[in-house]
Amino acid sequence: MMDIWIICVRSDMKNVILTGFMGTGKSSVGKLLAMRLDYRYIDLDTLIVADAGISINEIFAGVGEKGFRDIESRILESLECEEGIVLSTGGGAVISEANRGLLHNLGLVVNLFASAEEIKRRLQHEQDRPLLNDNKSLERIETLIALREPYYADADIRVETTCKSVALIVEEILIRLKKVA
């Protein structure tokens, strides 16, 4: 049954792009989704770190968010000929209008979202989130989500991840992909 599913999805869909706020499950979901679709998994932040040769925290400290977003856009542009990938983006990749266009050109955009409370719980011990390193308060998370929400809403599909397992989220995405493919 899985082989038929893969053929069906691949005939109409070049790539799957995961967007969403930090802590919504993009990396975990992306890895399993890629395996289920028999696609390659790519993490945009990993490509950025490899390109820059330093951590995301160091990039933000050195060139700020604007410099980071410029690198992010350049890496996204380099992926335009890729096929058969699941790409997890960073939480702010959708802020740039140019990036949103690149993401939609690259494939079907799936936005993962969760409640601010769930995100706070998931990120409480993380130290590699430059925009939250100094302030992981619920209010800060809610503010950032609200600022980005119009951009996240631009996705082709939106999937709630609050209190759901990675496997359940992937199943929901597969069902939704089948409907749009």
Image (cartoon, rainbow, N blue to C red):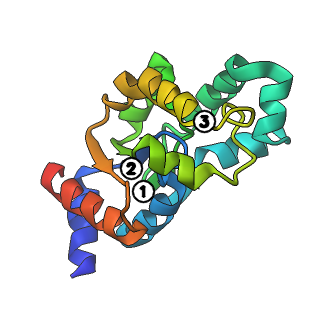
Name the foreground residue: 29 vs 178. Answer: 29
Please tell me the numbered disc located at residue 55.
none
Inter-mark Cα distance, 3 to 2: 35 Å
Q: Secondary structure at mark 2?
A: strand
Q: Is residue 93 left or right of residue 133?
A: left
User: Which kind of residue does numbered mark 1 sit on?
Assistant: Gly
Does any portion of residue 142 appear in the rendered image? yes
Three-letter amino acid code at the position of disc 2: Asn
Residue 96 percent location from the top left of the image? 50, 19
Quarter of the image with the N terminus in it: bottom left
Separation of marks 1 and 3 at Cα, in angstroms: 38 Å
Observer-nearest of 49 and 24: 24
Task: Measure the alpha-carbon separation of dots 1 and 2.
Answer: 5 Å
**Which residue position holds label 2?**
15
Q: Are marks 1 and 2 in contact (CB under 8 Å)?
A: yes
Q: Which residue is mark 1?
A: 84
Residue 173 appears at what percent x and percent y?
A: 28, 58
- The amino acid on which the numbered mark 3 sits, given as a three-letter code, is Ser
Q: Which residue shows up at 38% across the image and 49% down it?
A: 15
The residue that label 3 is drawn on is 137
